[in-house]
Image: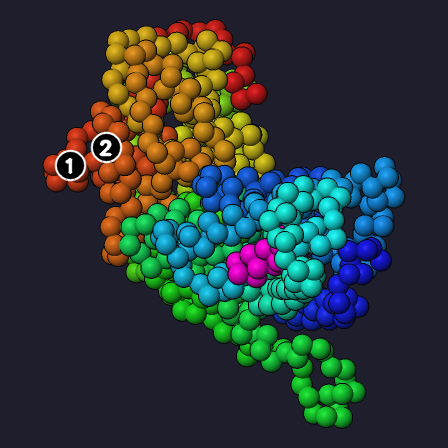
Amino acid sequence: MTEEIARVPLWPLAIVVFWTAVAFFALAMWRHLRVMLVVAPSGPIALRETPRRAWAVVEHALLQVRMFRDPPAALMHHAIFWGFVLLTVGTANAVTGGLVQAIVEWPFDGLLWAVANALQNVVALGVIAGVGYAFWRRLVTKPARLHYSNDALIILSLIGGLVSAVFLSTVFEAARFGELHGAVISNALAPLVSGLPPVVLEAGFAAGFWIHLLAVATFLVYLPGSKHLHIFTTPLNAFLRKLAPRGELPPMDLEREDQTFGLRTLADLGWKDLLDGFTCTECGRCQQACPAWATGKPLNPKSFIMGIRDMTDEAEHGLNLIPNSPLVRETYGLDDTLQPAALAKPIVDDAIPYDAVWDCVTCGACVEACPVLIEHVDKIVGLRRNLVLEESRFPTELTGAFRNMEGAQNPWGQPRSTRTDWTKGLAFEVPTVAALAAEGRLGEIEVLYWVGCAAAFDERNRRVARAFATCLNAAGVSFAILGQEESCTGDPARRMGNDYVFQMLAMGNVETLGRYGLRSIVTACPHCFNSLGNEYQQVGGNYEVVHHSVFLSRLLESGRLQVAGDDAGTVTLHDPCYLTRYNGIVDPQRDVLGAVPGLDLREMENRGCQTFCCGAGGGRMWMEEQRGTRINAERTRQALATGAETVATACPFCMVMMTDGLKDAAIAGTGVASAQDIAEILATRVVPRFGGGRQLHVLQ
């Protein structure tokens, strides 16, 4: 026992109080765990991924890198977090009767303990400043993403109170008993109070110690039912994070007779989904990033995750803090088991409104913004799966799209015979794989161009297909298309919750590609790119898929594709969500534009992985926006604010939405610009090449 602790009146009682609080905390956490143990499994954790998972803990739980997108809030949070962590060393020493100090002082003659004291003394002021700034934000400036919360104010008061108590106790201690080893700030402030009577100094020191200890004990008792439980769950959530590609939705086994299709109740969620609920910090970053919420729709990803946590808390109400044994239940008639009704309440219309489920554009902005790695989109699509496959409860506009994808293998409902109409008028031939196979020339195919439904059937996007084919031809790339054998990848069906149609389309495409032995694919559609590259492995398809922005940038870099021309004017780039956030492709489309002579690129504020959705993802292309402002109208406003003459895109869905938005803006007189795909901007300036160069594989 150290001399400092021995000076505290009734210090053994402090140890009893603290460890009683620890026991209560452990039992309350066990009550949470008991609910998590009875819900659906979340899949095994691959131990071979341990280094990657451990780095996620460092990156997101310790360094908290995503917090620095809001620097003032990040500095405040780091000051509180790291100060609290370092001050825990002193708390641990107090509640172990000086054991920590005894261990740390042993090497280097007490140098390490002096350093620890110095660090604790300095960071205490940082914590107090951070808590003060946090109060100012919540009570004065009130950022829109933060809602008033008594819970937050209680936690901030506890942290601020215990840290202030620790700091003041060291000042009184230094004034009464002499300088403390390493406590430089407390030692410097001690003369300010040293004139007080010794009994007052001793009382101040003892009061600080007890306030600190009681605040820590209160914190432990309060924490399991508070949003600040994320202090403990964030490292676990980071370690158990989804490591599969972000664009890969969880697979569904449609053959299992006992399978619940999608998510309906709390019991259908995985334990990782409940952990997400407990880890939510209520910071509102997901809410702030959500394009649906920003345009006045009822979807609020923060409220959704908080709703899951509230449902979990409700399911716990029948559980005792201390689980009773079968003997106690039989003797006294107590029932401490989870009641089926507690887990059977539907999530839709409880944790999230029905309309909000369908407002989601699956853009992933919420997931990208979340500092504690919560997965919102997978859960929302899981709810859609259940509504579609089990309840047949979905917006009426989707009926036609589902029918078209199932019958005509494309959401436009166009006949297969028109899939190659976009090639008409080209100055060169676009061969089909079937024709080359019939001639025994499959080996000549350098890459398969996956055209996609939008480029095949939408007249505006047919121009994009012709432009991209022109670039390929100018570079001397030997390519072919599937033509009438190509079907929709099923991305819209899957995002709309109809996994049955997705799997039907995907397995048909896998069979077609397998018949020809094709693995190298290029596509101008990020949705096709994501499905083929990230999700087709679930149905037996493994391919090397490249987006056309990457393909074109490699052609330009290798010299196979050359451009010439005059001033290309001013351009702003709209980043597609499924290209940037889902697959991390940010620079290639800019490299393509940068290769165009005289092009002036004017970036929007929301760009790259922080892009703002066009509003077409998640099947919203085939649904009307009946609530709030149209998402594409808001994105159009952002694009026009740059003053650019052209809005460049790299996605057919984005092309449709931005073209419509720009037309509406022109009619309203709010701005004039045109929308063009990066391939169109390039195609008008390429220098044709004939023959040669085919051996340089740009897919590598």
Please determine whether, in this image, residue 293 is positioned above or below residue 572: below
Q: Amino acid at mark 1?
A: Thr
In the image, is residue 674 part of the stretch drawn in magenta? Answer: no
Q: Secondary structure at mark 2?
A: helix
Tell me which amino acid carries mark 2: Leu
Mark 1 = which residue?
670
The Cα atoms of the two marked residues, 2 and 1, are separated by: 8 Å
| Closest to the observer, 265 or 324 | 324
Q: Residue at x 37, y 54 (%)?
A: 140
Pinpoint residue 587: horizontal percent, then vertical percent: 45, 25
Relative depth, front residue between 383 and 482: 383
Residue 593 appears in the rendering: yes
Q: Are marks 2 and 1 in contact (CB under 8 Å)?
A: yes
Q: Quadrant of the N terminus?
A: bottom right
Compared to residue 345, the image places residue 469 above or below, namely above
Q: Is residue 160 magenta?
A: yes
- The residue wearing badge 2 is 640
- The structure residue drawn at horizontal position 66% and vertical position 79%, both measured from the top left corner, is 320
Question: Does residue 301 show up?
Answer: no
Q: Is residue 202 left or right of residue 631?
A: right
**Image: magenta residue range:** 156-170
Name the residue located 42 percent from the left edge and 64 percent from the top edge: 352
